[in-house]
Amino acid sequence: MDNKKFILIFSLILSLCIFSAGCISGDGINDDEKNKVIITEETENSVSLESGKDILVSFMDKAAGYAKENGKEKALKAFNDNNGEFIDGNLYIYAYDFNGTLIAHPYQPELVGTDRLNWTTANGLQFVKASSDAARNGEGYVMYMYPSPGKSGEINESASDLYEPKIGYVKKIDDEWWIGSGIYLSEYIDKANNKMPEVIQDEIDFTNNAVEFAKENGREKALAEISNTSGKFVQGNLYIYAYDFNGTLLAHPYLTDKTGKNLNEKTGPYGVRSVEVLSKKAKLGGGYVIFGWENPSNDNKPELKLGYVKPVDENWWLGTGVYMSDLTR
């Protein structure tokens, strides 16, 4: 559970998605007025995703400093206050212990005290478990899908149609507990041209261009080009993959040994059945999914990934994805 903050200049949803994701998050604070962004429909100047991430990390640093200076009891009381100093626009702070128990959330007080370790987002991502693991390392980014909040801050985790991609940041307070907050990527749409941040827009354009190529040149030629590691559909960490709607891999530049195999049962890090979830999203017309996958540029280590998929026709679909390390560096 988290909520938004800054201003709109992204349009993803990205729908992040790593896994797939979603979950429990928060953020807030109110000194340093120069860092605050007032969100209104009339706002003409947008902050960049880079600036948004900087604000998020700064917000988290201040919350962590408050907790360490004032102690756990006072900090949790402040973080649970939905009218307090740790509500800053769309940012708020949430807190968990390392057993997965939610110990602070200003907009979901009914869940405080409950075990959320195995809670999953709409497409199966074990968000709390992933965030706890990141926090154990001290601090770091996470990526997930989470429902956008209502006007009064209410969050409906059962509303799968409201899930959209978020970038979260988590930070360890001590060996017992950690805090988190996050920003919705949809807050970073460039209102001047209705485009998302460059790294995400590149992902969308790349997929759309591949779909057009497939429609213009036919399935056989498209699959051959997608399988070619030196072809037009491999650009750095971006590459296109192709599946049919049954989950059978049709083409992949780095998984040629899996071509022709059904990968619906493949479960990525933190529980997401990646291919199955991506296929379902493509069948609905396309969009974002967060899931886990091996990164060929990082010794094939599993990493959260924001995928974007689009159908070619009623039989097959194409997709690509941005690894979290590329989105948050």
Image: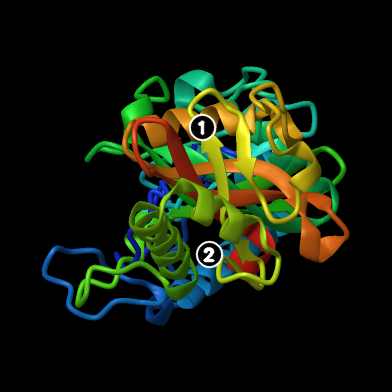
Residue 305 is situated, as x and y percent measured from the top left of the image, at 62, 51
Q: Is residue 155 above or below residue 28?
A: above
Crowd band around label 2 with a 10 angstrom C-alpha radius: few (<14), some (14–19), many (20+): many
From the viewer's perspective, tell me whether residue 19 is left or right of residue 99. Answer: left
For mark 1, what is the residue?
Answer: 244
The image quadrant of residue 185 is: bottom left
* Depth order, front residue of 77/164: 164
The residue lying at 40 percent from left, 61 percent from top is 213
Q: Is residue 167 visible?
A: no
The residue lying at 23 percent from left, 68 percent from top is 194
From the viewer's perspective, tell me whether residue 223 is left or right of residue 69. Answer: left
For mark 2, what is the residue?
Answer: 56
The numbered disc on residue 107 is none
Q: Is residue 197 above or below residue 312?
A: below
| Circles 2 and 1: CB atoms closer than 8 Å | no
The image quadrant of residue 234 is: bottom right
Mark sitting earlier along the chain (2/1): 2
From the viewer's perspective, tell me whether residue 129 is left or right of residue 151. Answer: right
* Depth order, front residue of 3/83: 3
Give the farthest residue toward the left: 42
Q: Is residue 31 above or below residue 118?
A: below
**Type of amino acid at the residue the image marks with label 1:** Asp
| Quarter of the C terminus within the rendering | bottom right
Residue 170 is situated, as x and y percent measured from the top left of the image, at 67, 52
Helix, strand or loop for disc 1 = strand
**Type of amino acid at the residue the image marks with label 2:** Leu
Residue 186 is situated, as x and y percent measured from the top left of the image, at 34, 56
* Depth order, front residue of 279/24: 279
- Which numbered mark, 2 or 1, is in the foreground of this view? 1
